[in-house]
C-alpha cells in the first residue's frame, strides 16, 4: 500500500467519501491505466510523466483558486458596479467553509467529474511510477 501521512490520508478520504462511487472508480481506473501505459516505457518517459504529475493541480488547489477568483470578482463588482455582487463572495466563503469542515461543497462533484484528483491519488500514480523506475534501474 502507498505510504502517506495521517493528515493527507484524512483529506483525501474526505473528498473520496464526498464523491459518488462511480466517479471514484473512474478516477482510479484512469490512474491504473496511466500506470499501465508506462509499464514498458523507458526511463525518460517515466521521468517526464512524474514531472507532469508534480505540476498537476489537485482538487484542493482547483477549489481554492476558483473560490478566490469568484470571491475577488464579486468583491470588485460589488465595489464598482452594484453592492448586490457582494453576495457572491459571501456564498463562495460559505462553500469554502463547508468544504473545510465536511470535505464537500457544491463545486466538488463537478470538479471530480472533470477528473481533478486528490493529492493522494496523484501521489499513488507517482509512487507506482517510481517503482517502475526502480525496477528499470535494477534490470540495468
Image (spheres, grey):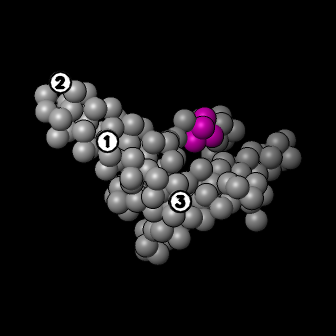
Label 2 or label 1, whichever comes before in sequence order: 2
Which residue in the structure is indicated by mark 2? 80
Which comes sooner in the sequence, label 3 or label 2? 2
Residue 132 highlighted magenta (yes or no): no
Q: Is residue 8 left or right of residue 115?
A: right
Secondary structure beneath disc 3? helix
The alpha-carbon separation of the residues under discs 1 and 3 comes to 18 Å
Q: Do residues under tags 3 and 2 come within 8 Å of each other at their CB atoms?
A: no
Please tell me whether residue 66 is drawn above or below residue 119 in the rendered image.
Answer: above
Q: Residue furthest left?
A: 81
Alpha-carbon neighbours of circle 1 within 10 Å: few (<14), some, or many (≥20)?
many
Q: Position of residue 8 (x, y in %)?
A: 68, 54
Q: Label 1: which residue?
A: 89
Query: Which residue shows up at 32% across the image and 32% down it?
Result: 72
Figure quadrant of the C terminus? top right
Could you tell me residue 115's position as x and y percent?
A: 42, 55
On screen, residue 34 versus residue 131, left or right, reads left
Name the residue located 45 percent from the left edge and 42 percent from the top edge: 64
**Residue under numbered circle 3:** 101
Q: Is residue 84 left or right of residue 17?
A: left
Quarter of the image holding residue 66?
Answer: top left
Vertical placement of residue 44 versus 38, above or below: above
Secondary structure of the residue carrying numbered label 1? helix
Q: Secondary structure at mark 2?
A: helix
All told, the count of numbered labels is 3
Q: Residues within 10 Å of mark 3 (few under 14, many from 20)?
A: few
Q: Quadrant of the N terminus?
A: bottom right
Residue drawn at (39%, 47%), measured in percent from left and top?
Answer: 93
Frontmost residue, 57 versus 138: 57
Residue 106 makes an appearance in the image: yes
Question: Which region shows up in magenta?
Answer: 49-54
Can residue 28 be seen in this snapshot? no
Amino acid at each position: 500500500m502507498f505510504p502517506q501521512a495521517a493528515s493527507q490520508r484524512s483529506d483525501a478520504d474526505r473528498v473520496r467519501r464526498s464523491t459518488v462511487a462511480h466517479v471514484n472508480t473512474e478516477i482510479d481506473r484512469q490512474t491504473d491505466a496511466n500506470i499501465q501505459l508506462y509499464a514498458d516505457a523507458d526511463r525518460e518517459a517515466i521521468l517526464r510523466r512524474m514531472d507532469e504529475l508534480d505540476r498537476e493541480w489537485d482538487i484542493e488547489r482547483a477549489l481554492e483558486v476558483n473560490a478566490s477568483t469568484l470571491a475577488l470578482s464579486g468583491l470588485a463588482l460589488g465595489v464598482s458596479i452594484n453592492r448586490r455582487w457582494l453576495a457572491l463572495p459571501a456564498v463562495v466563503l460559505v462553500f469554502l467553509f463547508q468544504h473545510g469542515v465536511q470535505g464537500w461543497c457544491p463545486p466538488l462533484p463537478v470538479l471530480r467529474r472533470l477528473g481533478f484528483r486528490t493529492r493522494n491519488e496523484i501521489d499513488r500514480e507517482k509512487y507506482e511510477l517510481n517503482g517502475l523506475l526502480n525496477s528499470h534501474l535494477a534490470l540495468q
